[in-house]
């Protein structure tokens, strides 16, 4: 039943566009995958019913993108329909792992695409495919890759180092803030190039070099989740992506060759640092004290009841962090964040 419900959800939104209202992301496929993965498949169709009025039709293409001419339309949202058609063709002719491995290193430098929703959508699709390969899941991967390609956006480059080894929480504490936090994300990220500390911060990928990439990536995700409990109040929705973006990369690693793991780690850290720089306030607020009487399942139900996809996806990521540590304080952070996101 779980498999069929997710595939039904993907089919329901198959002909919708990756964005709405000009630039807001279509969260339906990501939220559906998270709900199914966490055992809340019975809520999926009702959630999509409530979300349906936010969906727009899949954009039409302008002209086909040729395989040898992909660089020019990269990062051009006007060509979104062309990118959707392109990846439909790619995945019709090759296996999804082959397409992913070819395109991952091309897309990775533009990890900021769609406020990091490009990589996040791809990460959800990969997790679904690793659980079971079906045609709707392959098609969803293509839509995620197309969205990432259409909104491809590089960050200001990191420095070359070498930099001292630090843990993820200390590394996040060292991230500077952009001077103007009043604009949209593209304007905020553009300011990174003028931040003197940025190259060193972005280049100092946290974690001990002796640890493997999955361990270091998990450390970044965990630190971003915990930090949402103290800094998330200022921009609860946008700061969710400081955790969900690196988690999407972490989920993709099993489908990628080890040669792509190190650059994936570096890009994931840069995305987390960039979102932090763009949206985190200067001062923290106290985190929730102690734990909560809510179970992980009940926390996800609360997130679902809000109707907010960011709440669902954040709890989905908190679930991974909680599985690694078992710290009940994480459930209190999740419960607080749900309330903040719903009120944002």
Image (cartoon, grey):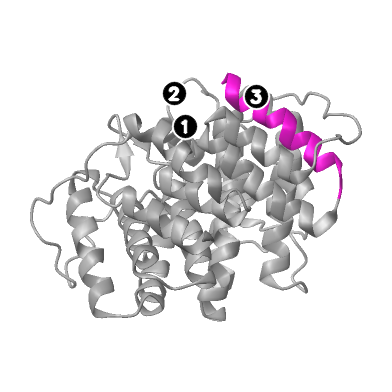
Q: Residue at x 73, y 32 (%)?
A: 335
x and y percent of residue 291 in the render?
Answer: 88, 36
x and y percent of residue 11 in the render?
Answer: 32, 54
Q: Residue at x 68, y 68 (%)?
A: 214
Q: Are the residues flagged by discs 1 and 2 in contact, CB closer than 8 Å?
A: yes
Which mark, by number, is residue 327? none
- Seen from the viewer's position, the closer of residues 94 and 195 is 94
Q: Residues within 10 Å of mark 2 (few under 14, many from 20)?
A: few
The answer to whether any part of residue 166 appears in the image is no
The residue identified by callout 1 is 188
Q: Residues within 10 Å of mark 1 (few under 14, many from 20)?
A: many
x and y percent of residue 110 in the render?
Answer: 40, 54
* Alpha carbon separation for disc pair 1 and 3: 22 Å
Q: Was residue 331 drawn as part of the magenta stretch in this picture?
A: yes
Q: Quadrant of residue 164?
A: bottom right
The residue identified by callout 3 is 340
Which mark, by number, is residue 183? 2
Mark 1 or 3, closer to the camera: 3
| Mark 1 vs 2, N-terminal side | 2
The answer to whether any part of residue 215 appears in the image is yes
Q: Residue at x 89, y 29 (%)?
A: 289
* Alpha carbon separation for disc pair 3 and 2: 20 Å
Magenta stretch in the rendered image = 327-344
| Mark 3 vs 2, N-terminal side | 2
């Amino acid at each position: 039943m779980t498999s069929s419900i997710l595939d039904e959800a993907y089919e329901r939104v198959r002909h919708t566009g990756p964005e709405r209202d000009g630039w807001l992301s279509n969260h339906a496929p990501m939220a559906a995958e998270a709900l199914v993965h966490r055992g809340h498949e019975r809520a999926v169709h009702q959630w999509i019913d409530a979300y349906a009025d936010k969906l727009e039709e899949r954009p039409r293409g302008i002209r086909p993108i040729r395989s040898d001419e992909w660089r020019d339309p990269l990062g051009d949202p006007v060509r979104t329909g062309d990118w959707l058609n392109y990846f439909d063709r790619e995945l019709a002719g090759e296996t999804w792992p082959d397409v992913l491995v070819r395109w991952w290193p091309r897309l990775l430098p533009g990890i900021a695409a769609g406020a990091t929703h490009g990589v996040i959508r791809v990460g959800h699709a990969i997790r679904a495919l690793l659980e079971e390969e079906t045609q709707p899941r392959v098609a969803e991967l293509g839509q995620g890759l197309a969205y990432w390609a259409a909104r491809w956006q590089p960050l200001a480059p990191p420095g070359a180092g070498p930099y001292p080894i630090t843990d993820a929480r200390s590394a996040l504490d060292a991230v500077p803030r952009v001077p103007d936090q009043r604009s949209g994300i593209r304007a905020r990220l553009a300011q990174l190039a003028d931040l003197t500390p940025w190259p060193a911060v972005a280049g100092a990928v946290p974690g001990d070099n002796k640890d493997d990439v999955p361990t270091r990536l998990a450390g970044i995700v965990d630190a971003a989740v915990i930090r949402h409990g103290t800094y998330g109040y200022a921009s609860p929705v946008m700061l969710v992506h400081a955790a969900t973006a690196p988690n999407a990369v972490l989920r993709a690693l099993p489908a990628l060759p080890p040669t792509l793991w190190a650059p994936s780690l570096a890009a994931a850290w840069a995305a987390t640092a960039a979102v932090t720089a763009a949206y985190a306030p200067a001062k923290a607020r106290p985190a929730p004290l102690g734990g909560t009487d809510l179970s992980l399942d009940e926390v996800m139900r609360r997130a679902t009841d809000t109707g907010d996809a960011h709440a669902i996806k954040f709890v989905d990521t908190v679930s991974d962090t909680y599985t690694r540590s078992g710290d009940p304080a994480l459930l209190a952070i999740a419960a607080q964040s749900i309330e903040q996101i719903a009120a944002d």
